[in-house]
Image (cartoon, helix red, strand yellow):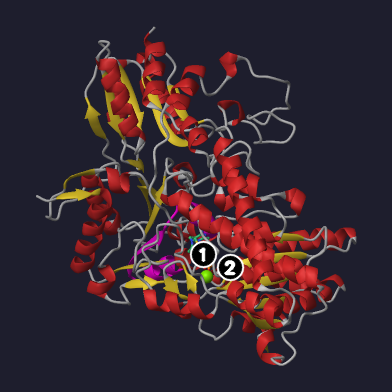
């Protein structure tokens, strides 16, 4: 089993799915050269009709994927930064998300909208946005956020085989830093199944994507103090595996939620509500959210780091919860 | 079809290039501005490679004549919008090198207090409405600035720089069409450097010139040699005068070439080294203008060398200023989000108490004491 980075794992998934199903094709800007390597080599293998380079026209990319899906294809559209999806919101939210419902169910729209989010690379405010909550708010769209190389491959395959528009959010830091043995066989990771990354009895920490690493680092610090944290990676936000989360909180009685997106109306708010709804009687304290403090991400590295939750901050929040 | 403006040096070889009524002093100023852009960016590149500067940095080297010639056609009070490749526009619009360099270094003394960086550098005081991380986003914004002038009946003009790649974005059509139907005082300058990120423009453009699209909006479409600062000046001046007179927008396409990669760190697999070397040798706007100045008898080599020396010294001062400036502190993280309100949008009632601080103090000390990591190159 070869070691692969997160971006290589995604590349494997695309290649395997394109070989398996001729209806699968990619479109997007500069996907032939592929800045982060995810679509690397696909053009050489599959040619210009399956790896379609487009002008800088995000609305056209989003809408073209929708139209192609409506006539039976399975497009995988790329937006290099999640920011650029903002240029295509009409096609994504007014069109793709709603078409099936508005048509009385008579549309099957197997589309993957791949994109990259996250902070930590001094890309400044426009290029540093985690907008998972925006798409979670649009009924009709599924939202996926892989955090490991293994999951990246398995979840992308599931996304491609899914019959709905899926916003598939990759992470700019994890592309290179997340690596592990990734099987070359055809495996999938199901939607709606959270992963328990660490077992613990004292507190449940739910970290979205790269914040899972931060949660694990905090858990290590806390273990030295005799505090055992359970760390959960939801993997998909829509659908959300609330059972795994609620079961954990019922055991630990405390919850901490960590994401890179802005705190206000971020996905953490949804998680808190769901936890309160499903585990109210078990809670010893109100759940705590750690997130970007409602500020556009600054360019300066010093300021940017201050705007991303850290392991020390997570550990401190847990200590306070346990007091 | 687009009007083609011939390079000035070809039209009047015997008498020297058309100087459009510019005085000797102003011609030398054009030269100095181009050099300021070139030397500033050469230094930025070095600093980046030495990890003394970071972020998404897109160099303008090779395209200096466009910003310089275009901005020289503007008057005090006129405004520009820019792109991710914005250093040249800033310098040509009169921004100072030191706070620019500080901004690129993420320092508090930068134009944006380190909050913007290279891709968002701006100075409204200079009528510079911002570099922009979003391709083509400046097109509607400059249309809006022109609308502001039009509504209030004042005489300013807006000028919009955008790339050839930006000409295929929806914002291009909506912004230019709106400006055209209202006859707004705006000039659209397409910097056609022949590449949009990692591919040649021909792959995106089914017609020969971006300027040909002017016809679709009923406005003049003009192609100009973007390596010839005087030709750019002439074309833009005509368009600016036209805009100011109330006759509406123009679309100018400056054919140019980007000597450096798309961003600092770009391995450039999409073009050959020979192609770049050829462009550097044949269409360097500074070399060309230096020759023109000598041909016109305006300046000898020594005078041009003096200008260069002074520019290099300015750049060094800017580097020192940037490097000696402090990192922004946590106290500014949550400022500037709203006007007249705190970070939560509530009307400002003064300082937050420590308990109300969203970022706790110990976190601040922890981050501030952490060593700043070197980061790899990245595309915008
Ligand atoms: C809306 C949007 N889509 C994609 C990008 C990524 N991107 C940054 S620069 C660039 C190429 C721009 O080409 P062009 O407009 O010709 O400007 P140039 O870089 O050549 O100056 C792309 C695709 C972006 N910044 N914004
Ligand atoms: Mg270009």
Q: Is the C-beta of the residue carrying label 1 under 8 Å from the nearest atom of ligand 1? A: no
Residue A296 in picture, x, y percent from top left: 56, 40
Chain bearing mark 1: A
Residue at point 33%, 27% (across, down) = A215
Asked where in the image residue B355 lies, by quadrant, the reply is: top right
Would you name the residue on which mark 1 appears? A59
Mark 2 is surrounded, within 10 Å at the Cα level, by few (under 14), some (14 to 19) or many (20 or more) other residues, namely some
Residue A166 shown in magenta: no
Q: Residue at x 71, y 77 (%)?
A: B230
Q: Are marks 2 and 1 in contact (CB under 8 Å)?
A: yes
Taking the image as drawn, is residue A248 in sight? yes
Seen in the picture, residue B351 relative to B123 is either above or below; the reply is above
In the image, B47 versus A215, the foreground residue is B47
B286 to B86, vertically: above or below: below
Helix, strand or loop at mark 1: helix
Residue hosting label 2: B170
Residue B73 vertical placement versus A7 (above, below): below
Chain letter belonging to callout 2:
B
Report how far apart the C-alphas of labels 2 and 1 lie in the structure.
7 Å
Residue extending farthest front: B302
Q: Give the magenta part as a residue range.
A: A64-88
The answer to whether residue B2 shows anywhere in this view is no
Toward the viewer: B38 or A312?
B38
Where the C terminus of chain A falls, by quadrant? top left
């Amino acid at each position: 089993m070869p070691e692969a980075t997160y971006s290589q794992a995604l590349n494997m998934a695309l290649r395997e799915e394109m070989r398996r199903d001729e209806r699968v094709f990619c479109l997007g800007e500069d996907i032939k050269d592929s800045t982060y390597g995810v679509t690397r080599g696909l053009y050489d293998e599959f040619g210009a009709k399956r790896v379609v380079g487009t002008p800088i026209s995000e609305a056209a990319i989003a809408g073209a994927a929708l139209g192609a899906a409506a006539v039976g294809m399975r497009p995988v559209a790329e937006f290099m930064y999640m920011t650029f999806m903002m240029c295509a919101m009409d096609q994504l939210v007014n069109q793709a998300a709603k078409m099936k419902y508005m048509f009385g169910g008579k549309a099957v729209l197997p589309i993957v909208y791949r994109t990259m989010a996250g902070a930590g690379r001094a890309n400044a405010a426009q290029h540093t946005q985690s907008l998972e909550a925006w798409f979670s708010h649009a009924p009709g769209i599924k939202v996926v956020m892989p955090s490991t190389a293994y999951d990246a491959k398995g979840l992308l395959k599931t996304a491609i085989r899914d019959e709905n528009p899926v916003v598939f959010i990759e992470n700019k830091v994890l592309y290179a830093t997340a690596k592990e043995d990734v099987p070359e066989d055809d495996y999938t990771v199901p939607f709606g199944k959270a992963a328990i990354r660490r077992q613990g009895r004292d507190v449940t920490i739910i970290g979205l994507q790269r914040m899972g690493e931060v949660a694990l680092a905090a858990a290590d610090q806390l273990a030295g103090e005799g505090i055992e944290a359970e760390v959960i990676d939801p993997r998909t936000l829509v659908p959300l595996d609330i059972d795994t989360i609620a079961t954990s909180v019922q055991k630990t009685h405390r919850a901490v939620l960590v994401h890179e997106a802005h705190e206000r109306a971020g996905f953490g708010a949804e998680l808190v509500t769901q936890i309160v709804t499903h585990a109210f009687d078990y809670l010893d304290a109100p759940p705590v959210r750690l997130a970007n403090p409602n500020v556009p991400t600054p360019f300066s590295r010093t300021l940017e780091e201050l705007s991303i939750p850290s392991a020390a901050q997570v550990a401190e929040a847990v200590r306070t919860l346990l007091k | 079809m687009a009007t083609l403006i011939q390079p000035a040096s070809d039209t009047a070889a015997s008498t020297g290039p058309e100087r459009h009524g510019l005085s000797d002093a102003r011609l030398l100023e054009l030269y100095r501005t181009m050099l300021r852009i070139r030397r500033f960016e050469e230094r930025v590149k070095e600093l980046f490679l030495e990890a003394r500067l970071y972020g998404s940095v897109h160099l303008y080297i090779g395209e200096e004549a466009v910003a310089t010639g275009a901005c020289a056609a503007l008057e005090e009070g006129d405004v520009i919008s820019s792109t991710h490749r914005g250093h040249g526009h800033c310098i040509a619009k009169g921004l100072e090198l030191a706070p620019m360099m500080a901004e690129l270094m993420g320092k508090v003394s930068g134009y944006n207090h380190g909050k913007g960086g290279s891709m968002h550098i701006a100075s409204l005081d200079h009528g510079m409405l911002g570099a922009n991380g979003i391709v083509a986003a400046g097109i509607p914004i400059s249309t809006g600035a022109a609308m502001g002038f039009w509504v209030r009946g004042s005489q300013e003009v807006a000028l919009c720089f955008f790339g050839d790649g930006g000409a295929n974005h929806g914002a291009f059509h909506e912004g230019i069409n709106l400006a055209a139907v209202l006859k707004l005082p705006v000039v659209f300058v397409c910097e056609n450097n022949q590449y949009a990120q990692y591919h040649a423009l021909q792959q995106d453009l089914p017609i020969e010139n971006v300027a040909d699209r002017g016809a679709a909006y009923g406005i003049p479409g003009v192609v100009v040699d973007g390596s010839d600062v005087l030709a750019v000046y002439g074309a833009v001046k005509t368009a600016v005068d036209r805009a100011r007179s109330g006759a509406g927008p123009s679309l100018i396409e400056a054919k140019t070439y980007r000597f450096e990669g798309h961003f600092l760190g770009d391995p450039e697999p999409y073009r050959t080294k020979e192609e770049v070397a050829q462009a550097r040798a044949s269409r360097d706007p500074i070399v060309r203008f230096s020759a023109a100045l000598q041909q016109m008898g305006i300046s000898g080599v020594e005078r041009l060398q003096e200008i260069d020396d002074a520019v290099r010294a300015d750049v060094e001062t800017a580097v020192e200023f940037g490097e000696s400036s402090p990192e922004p502190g946590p106290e500014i993280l949550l400022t500037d989000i709203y006007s007249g309100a705190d970070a939560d949008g509530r009307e400002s009632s003064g300082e937050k108490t420590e308990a109300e601080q969203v970022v706790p103090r110990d976190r601040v000390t922890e981050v501030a004491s952490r060593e700043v990591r070197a980061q790899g190159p990245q595309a915008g």
